[in-house]
Amino acid sequence: MKLFRMTLRAALVALRRNKLRSALTMLGIIIGVAAVVAMVSIGQGATAAVQAQIRSLGTNLLMVIPGATTAAGARSGWGGVSTLTVGDARAIERECSAVAAVTYLRRQVVQVVHADQNWSTVAQGTTSTFPVVREWNVARGRFFTAQEEEGAARVAVIGQTVVDQLFGVGQDPIGAIIRVRNVAFEVIGVLEAKGQTTWGQDQDDVLVLPFSTAEKRVFGTQLFNVVDMIFVSARSTADIPEAAKQIRALLRQRHRIPTGEDDDFTVRSLDDMARASETASRVMTNLLFAVASISLIVGGIGIMNIMLVSVTERTREIGLRMAVGAKPRHVLLQFLTEAVVLSAVGGGIGALVGIIGSLLIAHLGGWPTLLSPVAVAGALLFSAAVGIFFGYYPSWKASRLEPIAALRYE
């Protein structure tokens, strides 16, 4: 322990002797560690934000989407052909034991007018179970009832963005009359604000109508009882795979799809979306980590170069120490300690810079970041390892000098 303290003290004295050179040597390590911490924080923050957006769609949620079909040699992707109906949704709710609740919707871009204001938004015709399945509550007012949906009542629930654009920020639209394609609707509720998705879509820019009302009075469709999407809530997280299996079997039977042919629908769960997103984010985070790590390696090469110069400059000092009794391992330990101190101090400063940089990015750029103690600790350990790896050769070279030749070195 005494030897270590003396070695550390001698290393600090030697580094302070050339403060500017020591600071410039640490710069590569500082940049490398700061880049690693910042990049990993950004990557993990993006992953967490995507996962939160997926969870905001609802718990234990399954989505049934019109799938790929082939007709007369022409292939159509998701949503290209209307293959789902209201009857399909009701059959799922009635016959699939792993399903807790079902809702369905059709959507269309419409122009909404109130007084002298108008706004283009997405109208969704859906059912009274929409708030339950999507876990999207009403902040003010109420949602429409099953009786209103069956009776094609002219009532509407709007998102916060529509409120701000038509009525003004902070205004209460409950009871107001809006017009959608010359049809008057009474605003009975305002949905809770959900904000933007990670891909920039404003979830609050929405107008929710009873399905029958939207179908008969707004959309003007010639295909009745056709839906764009079915949302299904499984009874529990453990029931999601079984619910998906039951839905697929039921719809294949209802659509009369022969064995061996592709489905004309797609059943997707949030778990699938979350795993795909997590995999993509992990790949991106690892890529950013690898790129940032290059700076650490460059910093390590800088430490090696400076240590080799230091050995050359202090050759006579090394010879003198050996002449008065210092052993090769003592010389090796001193120079290796100097290299580790350079990388460790640079790593500490770099970690602090990376943390501050991550917070600034989150505050100024609005980019989601998530500080990871594991990433900070890993970057510090890696920087210390870089110091040991790149500092060993110059230290070994110093320890192999012959005392007589070192003392005669000019």
Image: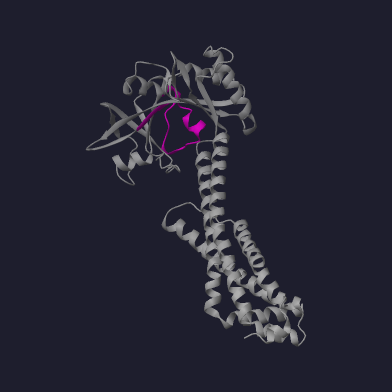
**Which residue is painted at 55% across and 38% down in the image?**
276
Question: Seen in the image, is 103 located left or right of residue 221?
Answer: right
| Quadrant (top left/top right/bottom left/bottom right) for the C terminus | bottom right
Q: Is residue 344 above or below residue 240?
A: below
- Say which residue appears at 53% left-offset and 74% top-offset: 23
Q: Kindly indicate the quadrant of the structure image that contains residue 180.
A: top left
Q: Is residue 132 above or below residue 263?
A: below
Say if 318 sits above or below 47 in the image: below
| Residue drawn at (51%, 31%) of the image | 133
- Give coordinates of residue 338: x percent, y percent: 64, 75
Viewer-nearest residue: 248 or 403 = 403
The location of residue 203, given as percent across then percent down, is: 41, 39
Quadrant of image for the N terminus: bottom right
In which quarter of the view is residue 346 placed?
A: bottom right
Q: How many labels were placed on the picture?
A: 0
Using residue 62 as the reference point, say whether residue 241 is left or right of it. right
Where is residue 11 drawn, in percent x and y? 65, 79
Residue 273 visible: yes
Query: Does the magenta segment cover residue 142?
Result: yes
Front one among 331 and 223: 331
Determine if the magenta segment contains residue 233. no
In this view, the residue in front, 165 or 288, is: 288
Residue drawn at (67%, 81%) of the image: 9
Segment colored magenta: 122-148
Q: Is residue 331 above or below residue 72?
A: below
Residue 172 seen anywhere in this rendered image of the structure: no
Residue 224 position within the rendered picture, expressed as x and y whole percent measured from the top left: 39, 16
